[in-house]
Image (spheres, rainbow, N blue to C red):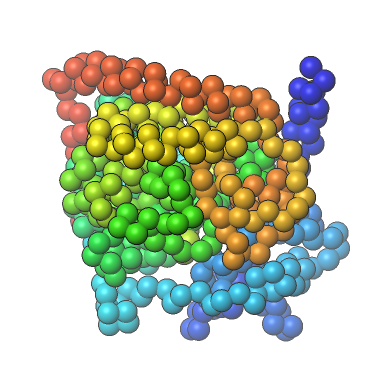
Amino acid sequence: MTRVRQEIRRYLAVEPVQVAELELEPEPGRGPGRGQDPGPDGGGVLRPGPGSPPVTHGEVFLLVRRAGRPVAALLGRVPEGADPRAVLTELARRHAGGGPAPAPAPASAPAATGHTVPFTTVVIATRERADRLAHALDSVLVQDHPDFEVVVVDNAPVTDATRDLVGREYAERVRYVTEPVPGLAVAHNTGLAAARGDVVAFTDDDVVADPRWLTELTAPFAADPGLGCATGLILPARLRTPAQVLLESHGGFAKGFAPRTYDPADPPADEPLFPFTAGRFGSGANMAFRTGVLRAVGGFDPATGAGTPARGGDDLYGFVRVLAQGHRLRYTPQALVWHHHRETWQDLETQAYGYGVGLTAYLTALLVNRPALLPAFLARLPRGLARARTLTAARDTDARRTAGAPGAPGVPGAPSTPDVPSTPGVPGGHDDRGHPWPRRLSRLQRKGMLYGPVGYLRARRALRAAQASVLSGTAGTAVPAGATGRSR
């Protein structure tokens, strides 16, 4: 009981952290944009994160950009009465200003790069969150990608709120599709079936996409014909509650700032569990697939994902299926979305348990749908169990520099990032441990992992029942909400 009280006190003592971004080197030909102008001292361009108020004194989670591209995330403190821009510019230059310049951004004009970005379908699955969806759509529709369409999949709706929003505000720019069977993977498969693009990108209804997100995420497909999947960087839109700060200080969804290609023909030497440590590759809020490749592997397993007894793992399943077919996967941190983390302790408990369930559920789905992977899985099982014990262990505060330590709780094997400067306790710093990870959440993760295979089998039965109940309905039928041409 004493330990529980201590964990509760520690949790309640976690203070909010501001979210901001700082441009060290504005792009040639581009003004400083929204936010503060650079000062006479040549300081960086500081602006608040999406939906955040102007930066003031206190702790700040800072995304550092150079020429528009993300290069690092730092945690700084602005003293009361100090100039936030000056303080954070100094911090950024000290820790991130001397790093290698980012690769040039993919240009929309073919002549600039030698490659065209592919025509892309953006799929957003949603359920009864029209207010969140509106913010996500607003950010997606202003992308600098020259050729894309947007499909909203309304998953098992109980009201007309999403349909009405799309018809009223986005009729000429967004296609609306219904999917009566609940489950994120089912909804994503419905979006995949509706996709007209050569590449299909997926994001969530609780994100704000960076203006160049889609171009950065899809340009690698034009450069590499063998690429089957791409993922990008996910950073917190807000760190206002203890739950949000706690999750991000233990890795969040970020996978670092170093681009990386995973090739099944040349397995990474530092990944002995490859390809089963799919959590290293990215997350479902920021992923894209070559449309034909994803269709060829059967899409996502519909008995996985949020909204099913399997709780999650649909994105990890898709990553491994594509890699197992011999296609490469590219992680590109220049493709950025800002994610609205869950806000309460109850949300954290649900998320911790769901991570555990989704992990073993997706592994079960892989072996059920592709038994040929069983020998490779069994060969890696002992190391996998040891890794699982490490990642689900309760973690105490550790003020040492630990960049490169294992990653986010419940997302096994988030990548090390030794090339990225780290500050003790940086949110998104991959287990820098600015706050202890409670034992209660560790126990829930492990409990979820034990339940995962059962959850998957129950999800399969529930799916069959749900599909039978709508056989005479219009599952996945496109509903016109206006013109359906490509967004420009």
Query: Is 174 displayed left or right of 45 in the figure?
Result: left
The answer, for residue 272, to whether it is visible in the render is yes
Quarter of the rendering containing residue 42: bottom right
Quadrant (top left/top right/bottom left/bottom right) for the C terminus: bottom left
Q: Is residue 5 positioned above or below 247 on the image?
A: above
The answer, for residue 347, to whether it is visible in the render is no
Quarter of the rendering containing residue 179: top left
- Residue ID at (34%, 59%): 266
Q: Position of residue 244 (x, y in %)?
A: 63, 40
Quadrant (top left/top right/bottom left/bottom right) for the N terminus: top right
Frontmost residue, 128 versus 380? 380
Query: Is 441 displayed left or right of 295 in the figure?
Result: right
Frontmost residue, 481 versus 190? 190
Query: Is 291 displayed left or right of 272 in the figure?
Result: left
Frontmost residue, 198 versus 327? 327
Question: In the current view of this chain or complex, which residue is farthest to the left?
Answer: 472
Q: Position of residue 112 (x, y in %)?
A: 32, 82
Frontmost residue, 89 versus 456? 456
- Residue ID at (63%, 44%): 250
